[in-house]
Amino acid sequence: MVSLILTWLIIAWGALACIYMLRCGWSRFPKRDVDVDDVVPFLYPVDISLAESLLDPAAEFEFRWKLGRLEFREAQRKRMRLYLEVTRRMAHNSKVLVQFADAEKNNQDPRRVLLASALQQKAIEVRLYSLMTRIRLRFWLLFRSDILNSMPVLSRLRTAGDIDGLQTYTALKTAAAAAFVQLQPEELDSLTRSL
Amino acid sequence: MNIVEFIPSCLLVVLLALLVRRRVYKALPYFFAYAAFAVGADIARFVTHSHRHLYYLTYWITEACYDFLGILVMYEVLHAVLGNLTRAWWARLIFPMVLVAGIGMSLARASAVPSRLSGPEFYIVIGEIAVRFVQVFVFAGLVTLVPVLGLRWRQYPFGVATGFGLYATIMLLTTTKFSDFGTRFKLLWGWTSLVAYSVAVLIWIWFFSVPQKLETPIAEISALSPGDLKQYKDALRRMR
């Protein structure tokens, strides 16, 4: 009986995937190629120093030490919400860069294709990290802090699935600077500020 | 033999020619081997068709080879997509886990629905159903990653997974839903299998009809020009 239910679930998953691919094929997504002008204005700045301070175990220990139980709980929830916003921006920026790298891979210059591949790999790693971290944060915000009555340690979110979030995001910025090397200095400045 | 039964074989020949033209044997050697084997297996089955014992032997040997190649192709597809995604240690466990889940599901199904086959044929059918489960897992899993990670769906490994995924989903559905049809099941299964496999080969032809650039190894790419290098260094300096 269990195996039959599982088989039906797997068939349904496969059928949904077929429908999704059919839709992709039908709509020919992505509809347009993303170029440099479609990148910089669409990025959200990520404050890496803020993220560093949120994930700093010493800062967290200090909060725990100085504040009362309820105050710490409230402060920790605020910090979690803040880090959720940071990861949301990371995920958004990496998606924009993945789309740019996809379009760039059609370029005739093999060096630009290689830089685009490196950018895409880093962007996907950041997206994977953001996804796993956001699931954990949402779970903590929804259940753990209220039901289990214990406060999660934010510094544990530095790595998720063996990916160091901040390190990978910095590597993504470096890869983006390499991929956009053909930009004018002021445009490159604007890109690095937006990331 | 009905002439309609030759449609998948003809389509496979077209696919093989396309794979040679696109030099897919470099990027996806196992899939190329699968397509070449499929053409060879169809010829062998056709040649032995009038010799009952020889055909029986050829049929089951080629089925076992299809199982083996099917697993290798799924490994290749996963490696091609996930190999570029993450170098985390757990990424290497994905394929063994999928394989174990597929075999587990096939064995569970075999214990729930007893088979009339015995001996090597029984194990080949178990393997075949396990491969179908693995194909659906890999296909559906990869398609789930497209919207989640923002991956490009129009690439060769996704095309291979889509063809196999569609065929495997339809075959699992047919085997699960219609097995209580009795003798009518065999006819229905045969026709569904023929149509689904033809559609799968058409999907592969569609994906491989568009040329896709193979990534150039780093060693073959010339170094940055001094101007580009200076600009790159300046950008990094400003970033820090």
Image: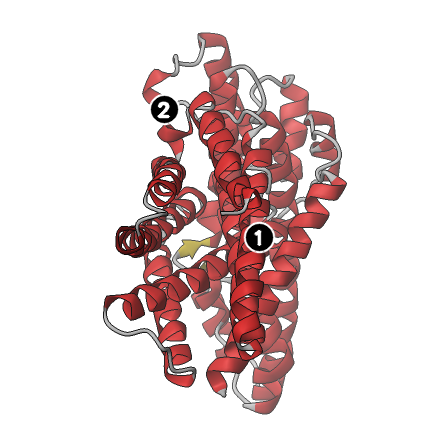
Residue at numbered disc 2: B217
| Total number of numbered discs in the rendering | 2
- In percent of width and height, residue B27 lies at 39, 32
What colour scheme does the image use? Answer: secondary structure
Residue B156 - label: none
Q: Nearer the viewer, residue B10 or A195?
A: B10
Residue drawn at x 36%, y 47% is: B49
- In percent of width and height, residue B134 lies at 42, 61
Left or right, B157 with respect to A189, comes to: left
The chain carrying label 1 is B
Q: Amino acid at mark 2?
A: Pro
Residue drawn at x 38%, y 58% is: A162
Q: Earlier in the sequence, mark 1 or mark 2?
A: 1
- In percent of width and height, residue A117 lies at 49, 32
Residue drawn at x 70%, y 33% is: A40
The chain carrying label 2 is B
Circle 1 — which element? helix
Left or right, A123 with respect to B116, comes to: right
Q: Amino acid at mark 1?
A: Ala
- Mark 2 neighbour class, 10 Å CA radius: few under 14, some 14 to 19, many 20 or more: few
Q: Quadrant of residue A36?
A: top right
Q: Quadrant of residue B131?
A: bottom left
- In percent of width and height, residue A112 lies at 52, 21
Residue at numbered disc 1: B196
Q: CA distance from mark 1 to mark 2?
A: 37 Å
- Note whether B70 is above or below A35 in the view shown: below
Say whether residue B60 is visible: yes
Circle 2 — which element? loop
- Note whether A176 is above or below A68 in the view shown: above
Q: Nearer the viewer, residue A72 or A115?
A: A115
